[in-house]
Image (cartoon, rainbow, N blue to C red):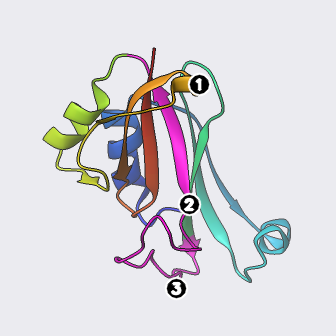
């Protein structure tokens, strides 16, 4: 979920380089039943990298009474969720720091146990407080 599609696009598209692949506004009985939210009207924006799964930004245009992520949410909270993005050039941490993104980790850190092929990584919050784990592959 996002509270502001424009702010999220500034993060995911402009800073991380994902491309907008589709946009729609969904509403009606089917959407209300899908979300279990009466009167649901959503702006949906699909983003993709060159390969792999994409990210959908869901902004509730109605109703607008959703609760934000608690500002003190931490990685060991039951409600915590993070999405992993894999980069290859290691430039994301610098770009995000320059844009004053909120880091959870103290910048990029070396990762032990490289069985998955990741050498460095960091955790950062998007404009709505969702946590992204961004890792660098060998």
Q: Earlier in the sequence, mark 3 or mark 2?
A: 3
Mark 2 lies on a secondary structure that is loop
- Residues at circles 3 and 2 in contact by the CB criterion of under 8 Å: no
Q: Nearer the viewer, mark 3 or mark 1?
A: 1
Q: Residues within 10 Å of mark 2 (few under 14, many from 20)?
A: few
Q: Nearer the viewer, mark 2 or mark 1?
A: 1
**Which residues are drawn in magenta?**
61-88
Q: Residues within 10 Å of mark 1 (few under 14, many from 20)?
A: few
**Residue 7 in the figure: left or right of residue 67:** left
Q: Going 46% across and 31% down the picture, which residue do you hit? A: 18
Distance of label 3 from label 1 (alpha carbons): 43 Å
Residue 90: x and y, percent? Answer: 31, 22
Q: Residue 65 colored magenta?
A: yes
Residue occupied by mark 1: 115
Residue occupied by mark 3: 65
Q: Nearer the viewer, residue 38 or 11?
A: 11
Judged by its main secondary structure, the magenta piece is: loop
Q: Going 51% across and 25% down the picture, which residue do you hit? A: 114
- Residues at circles 3 and 1 in contact by the CB criterion of under 8 Å: no
Residue 84: x and y, percent? Answer: 53, 41
Q: Vertical placement of 89 versus 84: above or below? A: above
Residue occupied by mark 2: 81
Q: Going 78% across and 74% down the picture, which residue do you hit? A: 32
Residue 42: x and y, percent? Answer: 62, 63
């Amino acid at each position: 979920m996002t509270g502001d599609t424009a702010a999220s696009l500034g993060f995911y598209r402009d800073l991380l380089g994902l491309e907008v692949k589709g946009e729609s506004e969904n509403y009606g009985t089917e959407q209300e039943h899908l979300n279990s939210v009466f009167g649901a009207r959503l702006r949906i924006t699909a983003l993709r990298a060159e390969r792999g799964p994409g990210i959908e930004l869901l902004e509730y245009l109605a109703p607008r009474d959703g609760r934000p992520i608690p500002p003190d949410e931490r990685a060991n909270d039951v409600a915590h969720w993070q999405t992993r993005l894999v980069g290859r050039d290691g430039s994301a941490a610098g770009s995000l720091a320059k844009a004053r993104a909120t880091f959870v980790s103290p910048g990029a850190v070396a990762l032990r146990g490289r069985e998955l092929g990741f050498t460095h990584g960091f955790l950062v919050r998007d404009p709505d407080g969702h946590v992204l784990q961004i890792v660098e592959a060998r």
